[in-house]
Amino acid sequence: MKLLMFKDYINSSLEETKKLAQLITERISNGSILLLNGDLGSGKTQFVRFIAEHLEVLDIVTSPSFLILNKYSTEKNVDMFHFDFYRVKNIQELEDLGFFEIIESNEGIVLIEWADLYRNLFDGKEKRIIDIYFNFIEDNINQREIVVKGNI
């Protein structure tokens, strides 16, 4: 059973972030959409790497900043689609990459960095979405506040 979750985490180490990624990975499945938002350097891509590790991705996970999409196969027999919307100029770019087919297929796990830039694309998919916000802690650059909202 999926439960609506709203949780605010303060992480002071990569190990704590890795544990959070594991917790989320244990609760997602084909069709899950993770929307990752936060400032540059706040930990979005590292979080994707941790999710990939728990899904047993077969390749090295890199940021798709310039490619917009990286697709990975996993030992868990589920594909992982990693988008980065930071440099997307228009919706046609996403169309050309097959974004809408991926989202509509309910196949694979979809992770999207900078998702709030095109938030309206996810209307009607709220039951499949987990929003994750990465925020710097003002007094400690090494800590992050990670806010998780969604059905997991």
Image (cartoon, rainbow, N blue to C red):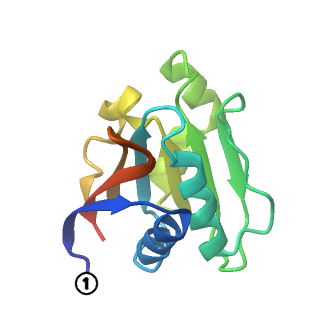
Q: Determine which residue is flagged by label 1.
A: 1
Using the image as rendered, state which of residue 133 and residue 136 is in the foreground: 136
Residue type, mark 1 in image: Met
Q: Is residue 66 left or right of residue 42?
A: right
Numbered disc total:
1
Please provide percent x and percent y for residue 90: 51, 17
Q: Is residue 83 visible?
A: yes
The one of 150 and 120 positioned closer to us in this rendering = 150
Residue at the extreme front of the image, as rendered: 139
Point out the image quarter for the N terminus.
bottom left
Q: Residue furthest right?
A: 59
Q: Residue at x 42, y 77 (%)?
A: 23
Q: Quadrant of residue 139?
A: top left
Q: What crowding class fits label 1: few (fewer than 14 Cα within 10 Å), some (14-19), or many (20 or more)?
A: few
Give percent across and percent down for residue 102.
55, 49
Residue at x 30%, y 62% (from the top left corner)? 9
Q: In which image quadrant can residue 34 be found?
A: bottom left
Which image quadrant for residue 32?
A: bottom left
Q: Is residue 131 visible?
A: no
Q: Quadrant of the C terminus?
A: bottom left
Among all residues in the image, which is located at the extreme bottom?
A: 1
